Image (spheres, grey):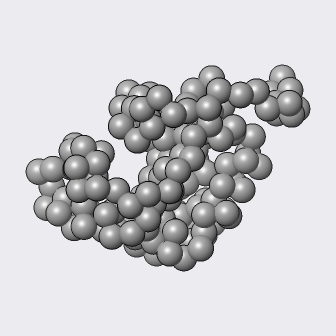
């Protein structure tokens, strides 16, 4: 089992896509173990996107991600990171396949609805940054209908 970090960005929240996005992850069979809505502080945003701090788009990214509420989530399941990345689709919504979240709802790289961890190390870092010790351990009774 892996746990991955997923964030619905301000554009996804403003467009009323939170329920639809959560539904897709639940229907796939992933288990929600952390959920909160907040407007990220400058410090939280800077820590989250520190890897991009030297890139020309960094300041715009920080301004965007702190512009309104986001929904931070932790999802658990077998190979949860790659499963989530497949549900999300490529960064550029215009290039994402229909059926993916970005393929169905995004038209831009900057306003692309959702973020998902890309590796175990990234997920560990992002989960600690956004949730500290707040994840909820529980067993879903239907899980034996998801996995062999």
> Toward which corner of the image does residue 64 lie, by quadrant?
bottom left
User: Could you tell whether 43 is left or right of 107 in the image?
Assistant: left
Residue 16 at x, y percent in the picture = 59, 73
User: Could you tell whether 25 is left or right of 53 in the image?
Assistant: right
Tell me: residue 9, above or below residue 126: below
Residue 116 at x, y percent in the picture = 47, 47
Which residue is rendered at x = 60% and y = 63% of the image?
A: 18
Which residue is rendered at x = 63% and y = 59% of the image?
A: 21
Whether residue 94 is visible here, answered yes or no, is no
> Toward which corner of the image does residue 129 lie, by quadrant?
top left
Which residue is rendered at x = 24% and y = 67% of the image?
A: 63
Tell me: residue 88, above or below residue 3: below
Location of the N terminus by quadrant is top right
Q: Which is nearer the eye, 99 or 59?
A: 59
Q: Which is nearer the eye, 113 or 40?
A: 40
Residue 100 at x, y percent in the picture = 61, 59
Which residue is rendered at x = 19% and y = 59% of the image?
A: 58
Residue 25 at x, y percent in the picture = 67, 49
User: Could you tell whether 91 is left or right of 84 in the image?
Assistant: left
């Amino acid at each position: 089992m892996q746990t991955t970090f997923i964030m619905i960005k301000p554009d996804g929240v403003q467009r009323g896509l939170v329920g639809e996005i959560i539904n897709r992850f639940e229907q796939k069979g992933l288990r929600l173990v952390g959920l909160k809505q907040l407007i990220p502080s400058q410090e939280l945003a800077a820590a989250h996107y520190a890897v991009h701090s030297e890139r020309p788009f960094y300041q715009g990214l920080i301004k965007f991600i702190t512009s309104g509420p986001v929904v931070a989530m932790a999802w658990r399941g077998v190979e949860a990171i790659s499963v989530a990345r497949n549900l999300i689709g490529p960064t550029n919504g215009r290039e994402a396949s229909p059926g993916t979240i970005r393929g169905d709802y995004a038209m831009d790289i900057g306003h692309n609805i959702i973020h998902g961890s890309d590796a175990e190390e990234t997920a560990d870092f992002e989960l600690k940054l956004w949730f500290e010790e707040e994840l909820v351990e529980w067993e879903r009774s239907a899980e034996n209908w998801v996995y062999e």
